[in-house]
C-alpha cells in the first residue's frame, strides 16, 4: 500500500475529489493546511501596498491506496489540480506498512 499526500489549491478540491471518487477506490482524508514552496509565499498588492503572505492556504488530500492504484491516482490529481501557475502544489508518495479497519479488525489488503 502507498500513502498519497497531495497539497494543492483549495479551489481545486471539489474537482480533485470528484475525479478521485470516479476511480471507485476507497476513502480519503482532507486537511485544510497552510504552506509555502520554493518562492517562500506570495506577495499581494492591496490598497496600494505590497503585503507578503508567508504561509498560503492550501488543502491536503491524503489517500492510502493499493499499489496497483497509485499511478492512476497520481495522474488524476496532476491533471485535475494543475493550473500551470506557480503554487499548484505537490504530491508525495510513501510506503504504508499496515492498515486496519477498526470496526472489524480487518487487516492489510482487506482494510482499505
Ligand atoms: N518540500 C515540501 N515539503 C512539504 N510541503 C511542500 C513542499 N513544497 C511544497 N509544499 C507544499 O505545497 C504547497 C504548494 O507548493 P508550490 O506549488 O508553491 O511548490 P513549488 O516547489 O514552489 O512549485 P511552484 O514553482 O510551482 O510554485 C506549499 O504551500 C506547501 O504546503
Ligand atoms: Mg511555489
Image: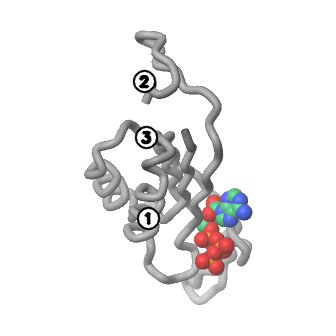
Mark toward the start of the polypeptide (2 vs 3)? 3
Local crowd size for mark 1, using a 10 Å CA cut-off: few (<14), some (14–19), many (≥20) = few
Query: Which one is in front in this view, the residue at disc 2 or the one at disc 3?
Result: 2
Task: Work out which residue is located at the far front of the displayed protein and give it.
Answer: 68
The kind of secondary structure element at disc 2 is: helix
Residue 65 seen anywhere in this rendered image of the structure: yes
Position of 28 relative to 100 (above/below): below
The kind of secondary structure element at disc 1 is: helix
Task: Work out which residue is located at the far top of the displayed protein and give it.
Answer: 104
Percent from the top left, x then y, of residue 90?
59, 64
Q: Which residue is mark 3?
A: 28
Percent from the top left, x then y, of residue 8?
51, 63
Q: Name the image colouring.
A: one colour
Alpha carbon of mark 2 to alpha carbon of mark 3: how far?
16 Å
Mark toward the start of the polypeptide (2 vs 1)? 1
Alpha carbon of mark 2 to alpha carbon of mark 1: how far?
24 Å
Amino acid at each position: 500500500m502507498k500513502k498519497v499526500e497531495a497539497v494543492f489549491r483549495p479551489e481545486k478540491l471539489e474537482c480533485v475529489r470528484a475525479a478521485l471518487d470516479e476511480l471507485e477506490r476507497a476513502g480519503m482524508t482532507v486537511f485544510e493546511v497552510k504552506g509555502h514552496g520554493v518562492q517562500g509565499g506570495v506577495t499581494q498588492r492591496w490598497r496600494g501596498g505590497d503585503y507578503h503572505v508567508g504561509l498560503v492556504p492550501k488543502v491536503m488530500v491524503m489517500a492510502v491506496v493499493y499499489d496497483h492504484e497509485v499511478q492512476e491516482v497520481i495522474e488524476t490529481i496532476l491533471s485535475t489540480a494543475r493550473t500551470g501557475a506557480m503554487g499548484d502544489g505537490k504530491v508525495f508518495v510513501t510506503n504504508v506498512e499496515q492498515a486496519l479497519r477498526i470496526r472489524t479488525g480487518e487487516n492489510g489488503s482487506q482494510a482499505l
